[in-house]
Amino acid sequence: MQLLIVDDHAVVREGLAAMLRHAKSVTSVLQAECGETGLAIARTHPDLALIMLDLTMPGMAGTQAVHAFGSARPDIPIIVLSASENPAHAQAALDAGALGYVPKSASPKTILLALDLVLAGEMYLPPLLLGASRPTLPTNLTGRQADVLAMLAKGQSNKDIAKALKLSDKTVKAHVTAIFKVLNVSNRTQAAHVARATKLVS
Protein backbone atom coordinates (compact mmCIF):
# COMPACT_ATOMS: atom_id res chain seq x y z
CA MET A 1 0.00 0.00 0.00
CA GLN A 2 1.37 3.37 -1.04
CA LEU A 3 0.75 6.59 0.90
CA LEU A 4 1.52 10.25 0.15
CA ILE A 5 2.44 12.87 2.77
CA VAL A 6 2.16 16.52 1.72
CA ASP A 7 3.73 18.90 4.25
CA ASP A 8 6.17 21.79 3.92
CA HIS A 9 8.12 20.78 7.03
CA ALA A 10 10.71 18.10 6.26
CA VAL A 11 11.01 17.03 9.91
CA VAL A 12 7.26 16.39 10.10
CA ARG A 13 7.27 14.47 6.82
CA GLU A 14 10.21 12.28 7.80
CA GLY A 15 8.86 11.54 11.27
CA LEU A 16 5.42 10.67 9.95
CA ALA A 17 6.85 8.57 7.13
CA ALA A 18 9.04 6.61 9.56
CA MET A 19 6.02 5.85 11.73
CA LEU A 20 3.74 4.92 8.83
CA ARG A 21 6.27 2.52 7.34
CA HIS A 22 5.66 0.32 10.37
CA ALA A 23 1.90 0.36 9.82
CA LYS A 24 0.23 -2.78 8.58
CA SER A 25 0.25 -3.20 4.78
CA VAL A 26 2.17 0.04 4.10
CA THR A 27 4.76 -0.70 1.41
CA SER A 28 5.99 2.81 0.61
CA VAL A 29 5.51 6.42 1.69
CA LEU A 30 5.91 9.20 -0.88
CA GLN A 31 6.56 12.78 0.18
CA ALA A 32 5.90 16.26 -1.22
CA GLU A 33 6.86 19.64 0.22
CA CYS A 34 3.94 21.59 -1.29
CA GLY A 35 0.48 21.13 -2.73
CA GLU A 36 1.56 21.55 -6.34
CA THR A 37 4.24 18.84 -6.08
CA GLY A 38 1.82 16.61 -4.20
CA LEU A 39 -0.76 16.94 -6.98
CA ALA A 40 1.83 15.99 -9.58
CA ILE A 41 2.71 12.88 -7.58
CA ALA A 42 -0.96 11.99 -7.04
CA ARG A 43 -1.67 12.23 -10.76
CA THR A 44 1.24 9.98 -11.72
CA HIS A 45 0.89 7.26 -9.07
CA PRO A 46 -2.30 5.28 -9.73
CA ASP A 47 -1.64 2.93 -6.80
CA LEU A 48 -1.89 5.57 -4.08
CA ALA A 49 -4.17 4.42 -1.26
CA LEU A 50 -4.31 7.57 0.89
CA ILE A 51 -3.10 11.17 1.09
CA MET A 52 -2.10 12.91 4.34
CA LEU A 53 -2.29 16.65 3.73
CA ASP A 54 -1.05 19.57 5.82
CA LEU A 55 -3.63 22.35 6.09
CA THR A 56 -1.17 25.26 6.22
CA MET A 57 1.47 25.44 3.51
CA PRO A 58 2.92 28.10 1.20
CA GLY A 59 0.99 28.36 -2.06
CA MET A 60 -1.99 26.06 -2.36
CA ALA A 61 -3.25 25.20 1.12
CA GLY A 62 -6.30 24.89 3.34
CA THR A 63 -9.62 23.80 1.92
CA GLN A 64 -8.39 24.85 -1.53
CA ALA A 65 -5.82 22.07 -1.36
CA VAL A 66 -8.40 19.54 -0.15
CA HIS A 67 -10.68 20.45 -3.06
CA ALA A 68 -7.79 20.27 -5.55
CA PHE A 69 -6.68 16.80 -4.45
CA GLY A 70 -10.29 15.62 -4.29
CA SER A 71 -10.90 16.80 -7.86
CA ALA A 72 -7.65 15.37 -9.22
CA ARG A 73 -8.01 11.99 -7.47
CA PRO A 74 -11.56 11.53 -6.15
CA ASP A 75 -10.78 7.85 -5.62
CA ILE A 76 -8.19 8.56 -2.92
CA PRO A 77 -9.24 9.40 0.68
CA ILE A 78 -7.63 12.42 2.33
CA ILE A 79 -6.64 12.88 5.96
CA VAL A 80 -5.78 16.44 6.95
CA LEU A 81 -2.91 16.73 9.42
CA SER A 82 -2.83 20.20 10.98
CA ALA A 83 -1.27 22.17 13.81
CA SER A 84 -4.65 23.82 14.35
CA GLU A 85 -7.00 22.41 16.98
CA ASN A 86 -9.75 24.86 16.12
CA PRO A 87 -13.01 22.88 15.63
CA ALA A 88 -14.01 25.27 12.83
CA HIS A 89 -10.86 24.41 10.88
CA ALA A 90 -11.51 20.70 11.36
CA GLN A 91 -15.11 21.02 10.24
CA ALA A 92 -14.10 23.08 7.20
CA ALA A 93 -11.62 20.40 6.14
CA LEU A 94 -14.23 17.66 6.49
CA ASP A 95 -16.81 19.75 4.65
CA ALA A 96 -14.29 20.21 1.83
CA GLY A 97 -14.06 16.45 1.38
CA ALA A 98 -11.39 15.20 3.78
CA LEU A 99 -12.33 11.95 5.51
CA GLY A 100 -10.25 12.63 8.59
CA TYR A 101 -8.71 15.49 10.56
CA VAL A 102 -5.78 14.82 12.88
CA PRO A 103 -4.04 17.51 14.98
CA LYS A 104 -0.24 17.31 14.81
CA SER A 105 -0.27 17.00 18.60
CA ALA A 106 -1.98 13.61 18.27
CA SER A 107 -0.19 10.47 19.42
CA PRO A 108 1.13 7.93 16.90
CA LYS A 109 -1.63 5.58 18.09
CA THR A 110 -4.29 8.17 17.18
CA ILE A 111 -2.75 8.80 13.77
CA LEU A 112 -2.70 5.08 13.00
CA LEU A 113 -6.29 4.74 14.21
CA ALA A 114 -7.36 7.53 11.85
CA LEU A 115 -5.44 5.84 9.03
CA ASP A 116 -7.11 2.47 9.65
CA LEU A 117 -10.60 3.99 9.89
CA VAL A 118 -10.32 6.02 6.72
CA LEU A 119 -8.79 3.14 4.75
CA ALA A 120 -11.71 1.00 5.94
CA GLY A 121 -14.13 3.50 4.40
CA GLU A 122 -15.07 5.32 7.59
CA MET A 123 -14.63 8.95 8.63
CA TYR A 124 -12.30 9.91 11.49
CA LEU A 125 -13.70 12.70 13.64
CA PRO A 126 -11.14 14.07 16.12
CA PRO A 127 -12.03 14.49 19.82
CA LEU A 128 -11.86 18.28 19.38
CA LEU A 129 -15.10 18.04 17.39
CA LEU A 130 -16.95 16.12 20.08
CA GLY A 131 -17.80 19.32 21.90
CA ALA A 132 -18.83 21.03 18.69
CA SER A 133 -22.20 20.62 17.06
CA ARG A 134 -22.65 17.43 15.07
CA PRO A 135 -22.53 17.87 11.29
CA THR A 136 -25.98 18.27 9.75
CA LEU A 137 -27.29 17.79 6.26
CA PRO A 138 -27.57 21.03 4.27
CA THR A 139 -31.05 22.52 4.59
CA ASN A 140 -31.28 22.95 0.81
CA LEU A 141 -31.28 19.17 0.31
CA THR A 142 -34.87 18.17 -0.48
CA GLY A 143 -36.68 15.33 1.23
CA ARG A 144 -36.57 13.20 -1.90
CA GLN A 145 -32.85 13.90 -2.32
CA ALA A 146 -32.32 12.82 1.30
CA ASP A 147 -34.14 9.55 0.49
CA VAL A 148 -31.92 9.00 -2.55
CA LEU A 149 -28.79 9.83 -0.51
CA ALA A 150 -29.74 7.37 2.22
CA MET A 151 -30.16 4.55 -0.32
CA LEU A 152 -27.00 5.57 -2.17
CA ALA A 153 -25.08 5.41 1.11
CA LYS A 154 -26.25 1.82 1.58
CA GLY A 155 -24.63 0.90 -1.73
CA GLN A 156 -27.74 0.73 -3.89
CA SER A 157 -27.42 1.50 -7.59
CA ASN A 158 -29.40 4.18 -9.41
CA LYS A 159 -31.52 1.42 -10.93
CA ASP A 160 -32.31 -0.06 -7.49
CA ILE A 161 -33.14 3.40 -6.10
CA ALA A 162 -35.41 4.15 -9.04
CA LYS A 163 -37.31 0.90 -8.53
CA ALA A 164 -37.68 1.35 -4.77
CA LEU A 165 -38.80 5.00 -4.97
CA LYS A 166 -40.88 4.49 -8.15
CA LEU A 167 -38.84 7.03 -10.08
CA SER A 168 -37.30 6.94 -13.55
CA ASP A 169 -33.59 6.24 -13.92
CA LYS A 170 -33.21 9.72 -15.40
CA THR A 171 -34.85 11.33 -12.36
CA VAL A 172 -32.63 9.43 -9.94
CA LYS A 173 -29.54 10.44 -11.92
CA ALA A 174 -30.67 14.08 -11.73
CA HIS A 175 -31.16 13.76 -7.96
CA VAL A 176 -27.68 12.24 -7.53
CA THR A 177 -26.13 15.06 -9.56
CA ALA A 178 -27.96 17.63 -7.44
CA ILE A 179 -26.89 15.87 -4.21
CA PHE A 180 -23.23 16.00 -5.27
CA LYS A 181 -23.58 19.74 -5.94
CA VAL A 182 -25.33 20.50 -2.63
CA LEU A 183 -22.88 18.41 -0.57
CA ASN A 184 -19.87 19.70 -2.54
CA VAL A 185 -18.64 16.17 -3.26
CA SER A 186 -17.51 14.54 -6.48
CA ASN A 187 -18.50 10.89 -6.10
CA ARG A 188 -20.84 8.42 -4.40
CA THR A 189 -18.26 7.39 -1.80
CA GLN A 190 -17.85 10.96 -0.53
CA ALA A 191 -21.63 11.45 -0.52
CA ALA A 192 -22.04 8.25 1.51
CA HIS A 193 -19.51 9.50 4.08
CA VAL A 194 -21.55 12.68 4.53
CA ALA A 195 -24.69 10.60 5.02
CA ARG A 196 -22.99 8.54 7.72
CA ALA A 197 -21.39 11.55 9.42
CA THR A 198 -24.76 13.27 9.69
CA LYS A 199 -26.42 10.05 10.90
CA LEU A 200 -28.77 9.91 7.91
CA VAL A 201 -27.75 6.24 7.81
CA SER A 202 -26.08 4.14 10.47
Image (cartoon, rainbow, N blue to C red):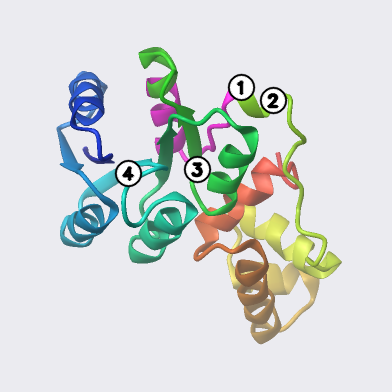
- Of helix, strand and loop, which one carries label 1? helix
The three-letter code of the residue at mark 3 reads: Leu
Q: Position of residue 29 (x, y in %)?
A: 17, 35
Q: Residue 162: x percent and y percent?
A: 70, 74
Give the structural element (helix, strand or loop) at label 3: loop
Mark 1 / mark 4, whichever is N-terminal: 4
Residue 160 point in image, percent of width and height: 65, 68
- N-terminal of the pair, mark 1 or mark 3, is 3
Q: Verify CB contact (< 8 Å) between mark 2 and mark 1.
A: yes
Separation (CA) of disc 2 from disc 3: 16 Å
Mark 1, residue position: 127
Label located before the other in sequence (4 or 3):
4
Secondary structure, mark 4, is: strand
Answer yes or no: do the residues labelled 2 and 4 have beta carbons within 8 Å?
no
Mark toward the start of the polypeptide (2 vs 4): 4
Question: Does residue 81 show up?
Answer: yes
Point out the stretch of residues depicted in magenta: 112-127
User: What residue is rendered at 50% in x and 31% in y?
Assistant: 84
Camera-nearest residue between 46 and 9: 9
Mark number, residue 51: 4
Q: CA distance from mark 4 to mark 3?
A: 10 Å
Name the amino acid, label 2. Leu
Residue 154 visible in the shown view:
no
Q: Residue at x 40, y 65 (%)?
A: 71
| Distance Cα–Cα, label 2 vs label 4 | 24 Å
Mark in the foreground, 2 or 3: 2
Q: Which residue is mark 2?
A: 130
Instruction: Give the CA separation, mark 1 to mark 4.
Output: 21 Å
Separation of marks 2 and 1 at Cα, in angstroms: 5 Å
Magenta stretch contains residue 117: yes
Residue 16 belongs to the span the image colors magenta? no
